[in-house]
């Protein structure tokens, strides 16, 4: 998607560069590789489809990430060498990361305007604002009517885009565009750059809920952006099952148990809420007291180990060395995964399997 920007140096506007890229050689690649584009004519149709549909745009970005060999002749620098890193300078003078941001922003602006409304200019007559005697003079043709005034009514879509624009930077945000749409501009302003910490559609839906809107309006912090210690009951060192349930549902962690009904998820929660004090004390700090990392780790552990082995490793009867085994594995990671479901699931699955000797 960003590739042929390198061949658009003559165009000054970034939007024009993107349009030129998608209408050029890049359109043939995306048409060939992405089923949703297969029936479209290469050229303008590819551009319109990608920019109007965040799901297709996300597919284009995934292709770009996973099949870089397709773009070695297109994503190039001034020396005609392939550009793979986001800070790499393209031949057009912009970095790859800047090009990605331009595309995501252009698509988001379209989506917000389509769903929420665009700004519009309206002409307003000024005659009604005149005193009665002047209205009579105008009606008699003795004086000229005042000229109409044109003013801009800002659309809700443009209002949202104005506050979120600077935070639309990354390719993984393409699939989130529809889920940014319900957010109130005031909430986006309050979150600021922390909105980049939310990478899952389910979490954005939770953020847009009436409960979280009221919470933030009252000065509170979103549950999923809080510390893991928020899970602990004030009366002791055990996990509060109701808060755990809220986190689980807001993160849609039921995905770890395909086909599981609400009753099964409640049973899983009961076992995880029974995690021992020793396990909490060992695991929580290693995960930076991050509520999403901590809860996801426990749920992944349960999904991998099953009820009996989870209780033996993390429950009240677990021995300290068993808990320490997993804590040490976490501490040895090169870095904690980003708060994205698939990343957390994959990293923590590896930790659990290694710790359990699987």
Image (cartoon, helix red, strand yellow):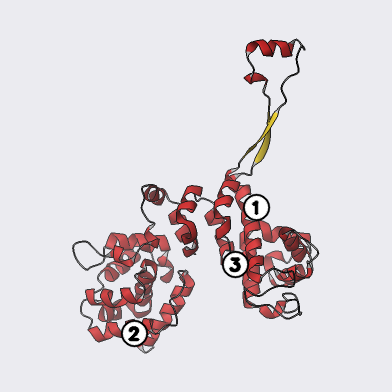
User: In the drawing, does residue 75 fall left or right of residue 341?
Assistant: right
Residue 147 in percent (x, y) is at: 73, 25
The residues tagged by marks 1 and 2 sit, at their Cα atoms, a distance apart of: 47 Å
At mark 3, the secondary structure is helix
User: In the drawing, does residue 260 fall left or right of residue 30?
Assistant: left
- From the image, which quarter does the N terminus lie in? bottom right
In depth, the one of 11 and 107 nearer the eye is: 11
Asked whether residue 56 appears in the rendered view, the answer is no
First reached walking from the N terminus: tag 1 or tag 3:
1
- Residue for point 73% across, 67% down: 38
At mark 1, the secondary structure is helix
User: In the drawing, does residue 22 fall left or right of residue 189?
Assistant: right
The residues tagged by marks 1 and 3 sit, at their Cα atoms, a distance apart of: 16 Å
> Which residue is labeled 3 in the image?
171
Asked whether residue 19 appears in the rendered view, the answer is yes
The residues tagged by marks 2 and 3 sit, at their Cα atoms, a distance apart of: 33 Å
Badge 2 density bin: few <14, some 14–19, many ≥20, Cα 10 Å: some
First reached walking from the N terminus: tag 2 or tag 3:
3
**Which disc, if any, is residue 78?**
none
In depth, the one of 133 and 21 nearer the eye is: 133
> Which residue is labeled 1 in the image?
110
> Which residue is labeled 2 in the image?
328
Residue 45 in percent (x, y) is at: 76, 59
Residue 289 in percent (x, y) is at: 34, 70
First reached walking from the N terminus: tag 1 or tag 2:
1
In the depicted structure, whether residue 332 falls above or below residue 36: below
- Residue for point 43% across, 51% down: 209
Using the rendered view, name the quadrant where residue 264 is placed. Answer: bottom left
Badge 1 density bin: few <14, some 14–19, many ≥20, Cα 10 Å: some
Q: Are marks 2 and 3 in contact (CB under 8 Å)?
A: no
């Amino acid at each position: 998607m960003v590739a042929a920007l390198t061949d658009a140096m003559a165009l000054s506007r970034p939007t024009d560069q993107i349009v030129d890229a998608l209408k050029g050689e890049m359109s043939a690649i995306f048409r060939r590789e992405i089923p949703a584009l297969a029936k479209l004519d290469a050229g303008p149709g590819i551009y319109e489809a990608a920019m109007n549909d965040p799901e297709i745009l996300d597919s284009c970005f995934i292709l770009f990430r996973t099949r870089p060999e397709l773009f070695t002749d297109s994503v190039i620098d001034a020396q005609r060498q392939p550009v793979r890193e986001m800070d790499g300078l393209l031949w057009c003078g912009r970095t790859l990361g800047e090009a990605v941001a331009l595309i995501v922003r252009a698509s988001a602006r379209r989506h917000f305007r389509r769903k929420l409304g665009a700004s519009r200019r309206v002409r307003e007559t000024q005659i009604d604002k005149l005193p009665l005697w002047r209205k009579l003079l105008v009606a008699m043709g003795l004086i000229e009517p005042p000229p109409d005034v044109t003013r801009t009514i800002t659309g809700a879509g443009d209002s949202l885009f104005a506050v979120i624009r600077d935070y639309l930077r990354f390719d993984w945000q393409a699939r989130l565009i529809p889920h940014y749409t319900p957010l109130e501009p005031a909430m986006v302003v309050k979150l600021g750059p922390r909105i980049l910490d939310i990478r899952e559609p389910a979490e954005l839906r939770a953020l847009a809920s009436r409960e979280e809107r009221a919470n933030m309006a009252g000065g509170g912090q979103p549950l999923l952006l809080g510390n893991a210690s928020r899970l602990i009951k004030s009366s002791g060192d055990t996990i509060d099952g109701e808060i755990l349930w809220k986190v689980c549902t807001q993160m849609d962690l039921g995905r770890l148990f395909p086909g599981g009904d609400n009753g099964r998820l409640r049973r899983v929660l009961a076992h995880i809420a029974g995690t021992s004090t020793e396990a909490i004390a060992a695991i929580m700090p290693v995960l930076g007291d991050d509520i999403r990392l901590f809860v996801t780790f426990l749920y992944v552990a349960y999904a991998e180990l099953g009820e009996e082995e989870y209780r033996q490793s993390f429950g009240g009867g677990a021995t300290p060395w068993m808990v320490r085994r997993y804590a040490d594995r976490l501490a040895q990671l090169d870095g904690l995964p980003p708060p994205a479901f698939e990343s957390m699931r994959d990293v923590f699955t590896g930790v659990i399997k290694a710790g359990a000797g699987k």
